[in-house]
Amino acid sequence: MKKTVLAILLCCAALLQAQTKYPTIVIETNYGTMKAMLYDDTPRHNDHYIRLIRQGYFDGTLFHRVVKNFVIQGGAQDSRNAPTGAQIGSGRTDMELMPEFREHHFHKKGALAAPRKGDNENPQKKSDASQLYIVHGKIYTPGRLDSTEMSVNIPIKNEIIRTHYLPVKEELARLKESDPWKFNALLDSVLNLVDSLYLEAPGKFFLPDGLKEAYTTIGGAHHLDGEYTVFGEVTHGLEVIDKIAALEVDGNSRPSQDAKIIRIYTE
């Protein structure tokens, strides 16, 4: 079943690739070659990265940060010809871009995205577009994703409970001691009302069906969604991500054996 879904997702990616106005990005590494498409609705990031790619900016750099079941990150200029064990991965403040968050572009396996500094020093969530990362991710169970939706929507339900439960709280406490039958009837009535209002409440968060399908089949890193700009996706060579993600790493998440970006070019 998973193989069938994966084939469908890759087929959809191929169709999207044919429709995009941007060229295919080819990423050659010492562990194999990946091809990626760029999304039409993230033009600021696309134009920037294409310019860097055509300048050879990423050629010879490393995937300096590799975290299995999460991401492989590379492109830092201080990683080029860096000696074994050296701490690398410095970003640049002169290549920051305003984010281009799109709900339908999420961190499924193979997503191509821009890293950034943390919220404390970067509240606008600007991308550090001097580097890039590709999602390796993990496979989620449907129950885990349902729990994510529920946790985000808890404040909405709590507000409904406060509005309709608190006014009868004292009455429920009195009936619990004096008339259990009426207590249960009133409690059921309140809970049914809360559930009914919650179902119809506006503003609730739901994960798109396509996202759920991807995260429960090929996997991803859903907690990054809405926090980092995803501007493309790998359409060929997902197995290369697996090979790099499987490498042993040091305490700074740098692979013990270099994962090198030989070159990135457009076709």
Image (cartoon, rainbow, N blue to C red):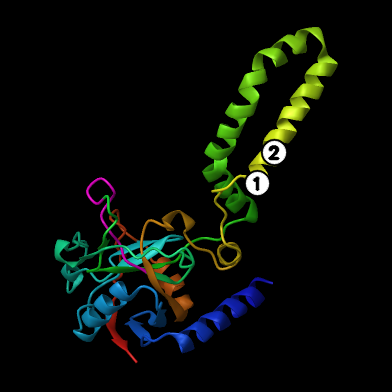
Q: Amino acid at mark 2?
A: Asp
Give, as a single range, the part of the protein colored magenta. 113-122
Q: CA distance from mark 2 to mark 1?
A: 9 Å
Upstream in the sequence, badge 2 or badge 1? 2
Q: Is residue 247 magenta?
A: no
Q: Position of residue 14 (x, y in %)?
A: 51, 85
- Is 93 left, or right, of 153 in this rendering? left
Q: Residue at x 59, y 37 (%)?
A: 157
The image quadrant that residue 89 belongs to is bottom left
Q: Give SS at disc 2.
A: helix
Q: Residue at x 26, y 68 (%)?
A: 131
- Is 192 left, or right, of 251 in this rendering? right
Q: Amino acid at mark 1?
A: Glu
The answer to whether residue 162 of the structure is visible from this angle is yes
The answer to whether residue 83 of the structure is visible from this angle is no
Name the disc covering residue 200, or none: 1
- Is 181 left, or right, of 90 in this rendering? right
Mark 2, residue position: 195
Position of the C terminus, as image quadrant, is bottom left
Q: Position of residue 132 (x, y in %)?
A: 30, 69
The image quadrant that residue 217 belongs to is bottom right
Q: Is residue 116 magenta?
A: yes
Q: Is residue 174 above or below residue 233?
A: above
Whether tag 2 and tag 1 are in contact, CB under 8 A, the answer is: no
